[in-house]
C-alpha cells in the first residue's frame, strides 16, 4: 500500500513513522508512507498557504492553489483521497478494514480554521475521528493510518487471527478480558478456565465474557 500524507506540519510524523508497528510495516515493505509539506506547493516568498475568510470571521482558511497542486502531485487517479474534518464520516474499525484493502491512500491534513470549501472537490472521502475539534488533521491522519497499517497482511505477529479476535472484530463486540503471569496478584486470580488448557471451554468463556463486557461498557455495540 502506498500512502501520501499532506500537511503543513510534516515534522509531527517523525516519531510516528520511526516507531512501533508503523515503522515495522514500512521496514517489511507492507506500506510506503510519504509525507508532503504543503508549503512546498506555495509559490510566494513566505510559502503562504492560508488567507482571511470571505464574509469575515475569526482565523484563517487554507487556500485552494497549494492544495490542488499538492494533491495533483500525488497522481491521485484511483486513490482514496481522504480529507480530515470534524464534519466527516466517523472513522471506525469498519472504515479501517475498508481502507486497508486499497492500494493507494492520500490524507489531507487541515489546519487553522480549516479548508476553503472548494478544496473538498479533491477528496473522495471525508473522515472525522470523533466529535471534537483539534488544531490540525495530523493526529487524525496518524490515528487512521496506524489502524489501517496494522491490518495489512504480515504486519502483526499473530496473523489474521490477531485482528479477528480483537475489539470490533469478527462479531463486532469488545474483546474479552485478558490475563498474563502471575496467576494470582494481590488476591486477584486469573480465571481457572484460562489455565485449564481446554480450548473449546476457553473459546466459550471468551465469547460469554466479550458479550458481558460489551453490555457493560458499550451497549450501543450490541446487535
Ligand atoms: C481547527 S480544525 C477546523 C475546524 C472547523 N473550523 C470546524 O469548525 O469544523 C483544523 C483542522 O483540523 C482537522 N481536524 C480537527 N478536528 C478533527 C476531527 N475530529 N477529525 C478529523 N480531523 C479533524 C481538520 O483537518 C481541520 O480542517
Image: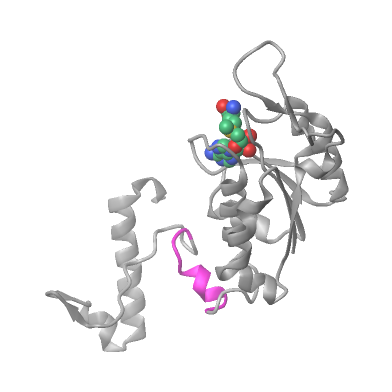
Q: Residue at x 49, y 62 (%)?
A: 169
User: What sort of colour scheme is used for the picture?
Assistant: one colour
Q: Is residue 208 above or below residue 114?
A: below
In screen coordinates, is 98 left or right of 158?
Answer: right
Does residue 166 belong to the magenta stretch?
A: yes
Q: Is residue 201 above or below residue 218?
A: below
Is residue 171 visible to the viewer in this orientation of the structure? yes
Is residue 89 visible to the viewer in this orientation of the structure? no
The residue nearer to you, when weighing 168 against 178, is 178
Q: Is residue 161 above or below residue 211?
A: below
Q: In the orientation shown, which residue stands out farthest toward the top?
A: 55
Where residue 207 sits in the image (x, y, percent)? 35, 68
Where residue 210 sits in the image (x, y, percent)? 34, 63
User: Total label count?
Assistant: 0
In screen coordinates, is 220 left or right of 122?
Answer: left
Where residue 6 sits in the image (x, y, percent)? 73, 47
Where residue 67 sits in the image (x, y, percent)? 79, 37
For the record, the magenta segment spans 158-168
Q: In the orientation shown, which residue stands out farthest toward the left?
A: 187
Which image quadrant for residue 60?
Answer: top right
The residue nearer to you, when weighing 82 against 198, is 82
Q: Quadrant of ligand 1?
A: top right
Q: Residue at x 51, y 34 (%)?
A: 133
In screen coordinates, is 71 left or right of 132?
Answer: right
In screen coordinates, is 67 left or right of 22?
Answer: right
The residue nearer to you, when weighing 40 against 86, is 40
Q: Residue at x 26, y 87 (%)?
A: 196
Could you tell me which quadrant the N terminus lies in?
bottom right
Q: Is residue 131 above or below residue 175?
A: above
Q: In the orientation shown, which residue stands out farthest toward the front?
A: 45
Amino acid at each position: 500500500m502506498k500512502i501520501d500524507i499532506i500537511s503543513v506540519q510534516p515534522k509531527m510524523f517523525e516519531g510516528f513513522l520511526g516507531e512501533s508497528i508503523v515503522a515495522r510495516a514500512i521496514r517489511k515493505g507492507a506500506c510506503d508512507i510519504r509525507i508532503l509539506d504543503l508549503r512546498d506547493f506555495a509559490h510566494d516568498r513566505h510559502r503562504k498557504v492560508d488567507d482571511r475568510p470571505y464574509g469575515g470571521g475569526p482565523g484563517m482558511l487554507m487556500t485552494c492553489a497549494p492544495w490542488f497542486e499538492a494533491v495533483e502531485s500525488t497522481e491521485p487517479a484511483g486513490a482514496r483521497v481522504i480529507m480530515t474534518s470534524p464534519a466527516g464520516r466517523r472513522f471506525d474499525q469498519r472504515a479501517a478494514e475498508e481502507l486497508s484493502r486499497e492500494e493507494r491512500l492520500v490524507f489531507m491534513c487541515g489546519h487553522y480554521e480549516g479548508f476553503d470549501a472548494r478544496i473538498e472537490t479533491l477528496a473522495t472521502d471525508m473522515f472525522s475521528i470523533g466529535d471534537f475539534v483539534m488544531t490540525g488533521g495530523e493526529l487524525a491522519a496518524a490515528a487512521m493510518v496506524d489502524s489501517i497499517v496494522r491490518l495489512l497482511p504480515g504486519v502483526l505477529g499473530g496473523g489474521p487471527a490477531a485482528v479477528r479476535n480483537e475489539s470490533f472484530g469478527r462479531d463486532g463486540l469488545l474483546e474479552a478480558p485478558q490475563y498474563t503471569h502471575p496467576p494470582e496478584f494481590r488476591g486477584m486470580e486469573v480465571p481457572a478456565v484460562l489455565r485449564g488448557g481446554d480450548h473449546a471451554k476457553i473459546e466459550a468463556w471468551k465469547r460469554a465474557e466479550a458479550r458481558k463486557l460489551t453490555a457493560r461498557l458499550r451497549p450501543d455495540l450490541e446487535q
